[in-house]
Image (cartoon, coloured by chain):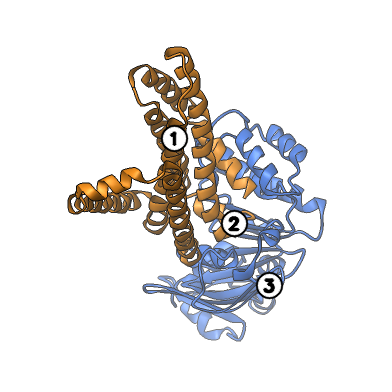
Amino acid sequence: MITIRNLTKTYGDFRLNISMEIQTGRVTGLVGRNGAGKSTTIKSLLGLVRPDGGEVRVLGKPASELTSADRENIGVAFSDSGFSSYLKLRDVVSILRNAYPNFDEKWFLDACKKGRLPMDKPLKEFSTGMRARARVLIACSHRAKLLILDEPTAGLDVVARNEVLDMLRDYLAEDGERTVLISSHISTDLEGFCDDIYMLHDGEIVLHEDTDVILGEYGVLRLSDKAYEQIDKQYILKTRRESFGYTCLTNQRQFYADNYPDIVIEAGSIDELIIMMAKEA
Amino acid sequence: MKGLIAKDFAILRQRGKIMLILLIWGVGMNFIMEDSSFVVGWLVMIATITAMSTLSYDEYDNCMPFLMSLPVTRRTYAVEKYAFSALVGTAAWLVSVVLVTVCELVIRKQMPTAENYLSMVIFLAGIMIIPAISIPPQLKWGVEKGRLVMIGIFGVIAVGAFVFSRISADPALIAKLEKLPLGGFVAGTIAVVLALTAVSLHISVKIMEKKEF
């Protein structure tokens, strides 16, 4: 569905240099700190920025050659861009009806009603959560094969975030072929939602792994200086010096649990991964 | 294209009250002004500028990344801005021509002359230059900076026209110009406006195709 090979893009001191592949029917998360390159990656996929080099293919063709008809198969939501806030959802319905031949008006109206989104209120009077829900519903409204969502839960409280993710789960449940690329710096959102995770740091992919593997097999070891000297380091991915000794990231948590029962081992989480991968040893 | 036009009409509706006030003002002007074609020109100009203000709305909320993700090409976006300005300007022209005709019939108990109508056509064509001059700089530098560039361009045109009028203040030349048939003058104006719009559109498409969002 999406192929990126050696995509490069430079902004001043920042340089994005990544490759990734997203298969049909998968939900892929793009995580990383603010400024890691998530939005630039997504904008490259949508042809909004021109790569300096490399190849970006979406729906089987170069992103720069996507036609209007191709874009009908893509649903997009940004955290900081959408329709003018002076418009009402009633206006948005009229726009979508004219823009997308596959716009499912009944589904959209029902979903807005279910999501308590008023049709006759300007978007600027919506709460942050309401705007986020509206943006995701707009992205889903034309039954797109591919959803590209850039930080759709940014700035939302935990309840609002869950509402947005539930809407996306419902959308995916309708058709197993639908594909989603979602970026977020809130890792817990992605842990229960994505099949696999790409982690970006300083413009590079530092990790790509299935979410189940991250949660089931990755772990963080808290080690004294002595314990650190003694353990087998072949499954240690990253090490960080601490006041008490060392913190180590491993992708073989069970190996250390079986062979070193006395050391402190914490289950893997995307937050821990970001902290470990982002910080220098 | 249809989606973008629907969006711009929805934005235009936000300014419906202002448009209504301007329409009422236009009716009032008919009672005062001797030359009814002025009212047509004024209303069409306001309508065209209002139509182009949709560019500000697109820019104001950082809408462009999202709009360029809709099923439209960059070329379509540029073409739509010209088409929408022309559509709204022409609609305003038709409304104002009907308005002026009705007002003439009511106030002066007579139809506007054929010459009046040809003047109104010149106004329509002349005002259509506004999008051609102002859209490319607004797309290139954004609405705020683009407006400054646009004011600069109009300033240059005004100075150029003033200098030209001084240089060519030859009574013989003026007499020649006055003898030009009005129909030919109208056709010439339309041709110039169309050519200018084509060049402007080409520039706008190139600007959009190079732009990053």
Residue that carries the numbered disc 1 in the rendered image: B120
* A130 or B209: nearer the viewer: B209
- Alpha carbon distance from label 3 to label 2: 16 Å
Badge 1 amino acid: Met
| Chain in orange on the image | B
User: Do the residues bearing badges 1 and 2 touch, measured as CB atoms within 8 Å?
Assistant: no
Labels 1 and 3 positioned on one and the same chain: no
Q: Quadrant of residue A280?
A: bottom left
- Alpha carbon distance from label 1 to label 3: 50 Å
Badge 3 amino acid: Lys
The subunit letter for the residue under badge 1 reads B
Query: Tag 1's secondary structure?
Result: helix
Q: Residue at x 61, y 56 (%)?
A: B72
Residue that carries the numbered disc 3 in the rendered image: A61
> Residue B157: percent from the left, percent from the top?
28, 52
Relative height, residue B28 to residue A126 (above, below): above
- Alpha carbon distance from label 1 to label 2: 40 Å
On residue B69, the disc is: 2
- Quarter of the image with the C terminus of chain A in it: bottom left
